[in-house]
Image (tube, rainbow, N blue to C red):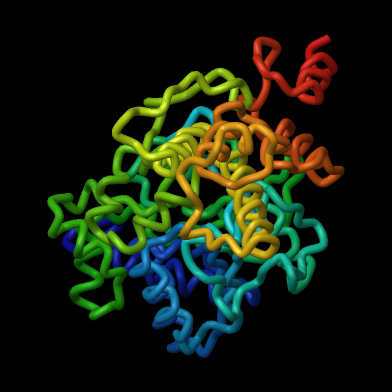
């Protein structure tokens, strides 16, 4: 904490900036990520606000696939006494998936993926069912949301607004440029640590301010120690796992910064990792394995050491590597197939035979794992080989998958299904 600026150390300068903001703005919110910088920022703000008898709000955007320790830290800081409203956002936003070229984005808190959520939705959050933002659309980008929230907050409270952002310029050149250069931005009372928010070519009466902009990471941990501040324990685990304080990053696990650190996630919170692994396409395999089309016939042959049941699971997992939605589609069909045989012929799913008489399998009169595997091998989207009929629901799902997945079909797709052949002809004619 020895760094000097204008004859003040950075802690004194930050407190002075917060005092300026609280003296000049009635409506203030802080953008909080659960990381070390924004954590120190809002705890300092709480101390200053308490002394000045002021209140402030907090915006926290929950990306679902978070460290458990991060969520625990967030819950503790929600209880800071000077916080008026804590906006815990758990809305279905589109986020970067840097671990897969096939699913470049994923949507957190997506209702149709509820069975894959990394954790349960927080009880006191703003979600798609109670969302007060009329402008919000499912799949909205994070960057668009924070700008629209600022405009919504301004409209709600009227008068100028201040938004605290916990960034430090020593972390990147872009952050330094955001704060240091005055030519292309408007500021509040010429304070270079403020920036008037601009939407397209229009400025609105919201000022971002950066009370910790000239801090270093050593200053952050010095403040935690000297002021006995709460902190996210995941940083302690990162340090014990060999990451120095300058290497530690906290962001959504599939982003560009975390792409090379997914093993770190696994080492720090293994129980969370297992859920993260299943949440987003490509996490465990990255860009190692891909195919040009998902619905083409699978050229495969059952290894001798595998049973037909094991082979069926293997085929499903292979499809899931490059198209998770298609794998889940087949899983649901196979599950219905088993339930029907259980109800109609009292065949327990645990007792399905590996093989049955070939003639009866071909006539679709018996259930067996070989029959299931053969249907998957053919990438039979409608699962007609398991006695399913083509339905409008299937057609709608196929349209949705084509819209969502670039790799589902292409003009070279080889399939025996006449319906799919017709779809391909329509797509590429």
Rendering quarter of residue 183: top right
Residue 281 appears anywhere in the view: yes
Residue 99 picture location, percent across and down: 43, 36
Q: Is residue 246 above or below residue 91?
A: above
Is the N terminus in the top left, top right, bottom left or bottom right quadrant?
bottom left
Identify which residue, 300 or 173, lies in the foreground.
Answer: 300
Q: Residue at x 24, y 70 (%)?
A: 223
Q: Is residue 243 left or right of residue 290?
A: left
Identify which residue, 170 or 426, lies in the foreground.
Answer: 426
Q: Is residue 225 left or right of residue 426?
A: left
Q: Residue at x 44, y 66 (%)?
A: 17
Q: Is residue 393 left or right of residue 328?
A: right
Is the C terminus in the top left, top right, bottom left or bottom right quadrant?
top right
Residue 396 picture location, percent across and down: 82, 41
Residue 274 picture location, percent across and down: 36, 56
Tally the marks: 0
Identify which residue, 429 or 369, lies in the foreground.
Answer: 369
Rendering quarter of residue 84: bottom right
Residue 165 picture location, percent across and down: 49, 59
Residue 8 appears anywhere in the view: no
Q: Is residue 326 above or below residue 351?
A: above
Q: Residue at x 61, y 55 (%)?
A: 338
Q: Residue at x 50, y 53 (%)?
A: 352
Identify which residue, 206 or 95, lies in the foreground.
Answer: 95
């Amino acid at each position: 904490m020895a760094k000097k600026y204008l004859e003040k150390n950075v802690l004194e300068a930050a407190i002075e900036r917060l005092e300026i903001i609280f003296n000049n703005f009635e409506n203030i919110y802080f953008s909080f990520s659960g990381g070390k910088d924004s954590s120190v920022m809002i705890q300092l703000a709480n101390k200053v606000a308490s002394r000045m008898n002021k209140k402030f709000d907090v915006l926290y955007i929950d990306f679902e696939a978070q460290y458990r320790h991060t969520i625990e830290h967030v819950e503790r800081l929600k209880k800071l006494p000077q916080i008026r409203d804590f906006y815990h956002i758990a809305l279905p936003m589109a986020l970067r998936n840097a671990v897969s070229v096939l699913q470049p984005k994923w949507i957190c808190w997506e209702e149709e993926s509820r069975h894959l959520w990394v954790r349960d939705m927080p009880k006191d959050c703003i979600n798609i069912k109670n969302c007060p933002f009329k402008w919000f659309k499912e799949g909205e980008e994070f960057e668009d949301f924070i700008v629209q929230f600022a405009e919504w907050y301004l409209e709600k409270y009227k008068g100028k607004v201040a938004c605290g952002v916990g960034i430090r310029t020593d972390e990147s050149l872009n952050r330094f440029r955001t704060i240091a250069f005055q030519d292309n931005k408007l500021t509040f009372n010429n304070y270079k640590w403020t920036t008037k928010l601009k939407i397209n070519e229009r400025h609105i009466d919201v000022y971002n301010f950066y009370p910790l902009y000239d801090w270093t990471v050593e200053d952050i941990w010095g403040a935690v120690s000297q002021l006995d501040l709460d902190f996210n324990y995941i940083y302690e685990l990162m340090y014990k796992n060999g990451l120095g304080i300058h290497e530690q990053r906290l962001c959504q696990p599939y982003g560009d910064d975390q792409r090379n650190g997914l093993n770190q996630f696994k080492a720090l919170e293994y129980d969370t990792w297992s859920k993260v692994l299943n949440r987003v396409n490509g996490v465990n395999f990255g860009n190692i394995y891909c195919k040009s089309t998902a619905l083409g016939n699978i050229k495969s042959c059952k290894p001798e050491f595998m049973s037909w049941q094991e082979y069926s699971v293997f085929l499903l997992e292979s499809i899931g590597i490059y198209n998770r939605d298609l794998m889940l589609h087949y899983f649901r069909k196979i599950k219905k197939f088993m339930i029907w045989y259980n109800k109609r012929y009292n065949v327990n799913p645990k007792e399905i035979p590996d093989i049955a008489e070939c003639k009866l399998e071909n006539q679709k009169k018996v259930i067996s794992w070989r029959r299931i595997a053969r249907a998957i091998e053919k990438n039979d989207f409608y699962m007609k080989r398991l006695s399913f009929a083509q339905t409008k629901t299937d057609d709608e799902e196929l349209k949705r998958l084509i819209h969502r997945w670039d790799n589902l079909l292409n003009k070279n797709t080889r399939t025996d299904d006449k319906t799919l052949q017709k779809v391909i002809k329509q797509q590429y004619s």
